[in-house]
Amino acid sequence: MKLFDPTTKRTGPSTMPLAPRPASLQGLRLGLVDNRKVNAAAILEKVADRLAAKHGTRVSVRDVKRSPSHEIDAKAIAALKRDADLVISGVGD
């Protein structure tokens, strides 16, 4: 079990660099991560459909978290790194 104490002081870097942005979305492979919040799956699918229609993207990886507060596991991270050019993590509610 991992416990996170939000009251402690930051120990890592004060900022985190953003991931490089693709020059174009045309033809990219999407990874979708459903966090299990209400409507997350529906929102992810709608976004994926719109990106496919506008930019020719396709969903190549789908993952569902155990709960909104859990991280995805190492196997899912490896699949996203290997098989997706762009990852969208869904939030609902």
Image: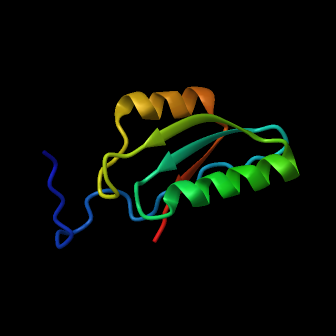
Task: Examine the rendered structure and indicate whether residue 83 appears above or below residue 64.
Answer: above
Percent across and percent down for residue 61 are 57, 34
- Kindly indicate the quadrant of the structure image that contains residue 74: top left
Q: Quadrant of the N terminus?
A: top left
**In front: 7, or 2?**
2
| Picture mark count | 0
Task: Examine the rendered structure and indicate whether residue 91 appears above or below residue 20.
Answer: below
- Image coloring type: rainbow
Going by the image, does 70 lie left or right of 76?
left
Asked whether the viewer can see residue 30, the reply is yes
Which residue is located at x 60 percent, y 54 percent? 44
Asked whether the viewer can see residue 17, the reply is no
Going by the image, does 41 lie left or right of 70?
right
Going by the image, does 65 lie left or right of 53?
left
**In front: 75, or 9?**
75
Going by the image, does 13 lie left or right of 63?
left
Task: Examine the rendered structure and indicate whether residue 2 appears above or below residue 76.
Answer: below
- Kindly indicate the quadrant of the structure image that contains residue 46: bottom right
Percent across and percent down for residue 84 are 63, 34
Percent across and percent down for residue 80 are 54, 34
Which residue is located at x 59 percent, y 60 percent? 43
Which residue is located at x 25 percent, y 59 percent? 11
Which residue is located at x 48 percent, y 66 percent? 92
Percent across and percent down for residue 69 are 30, 57
Q: Quadrant of the C terminus?
A: bottom left
**In front: 19, or 73?**
73
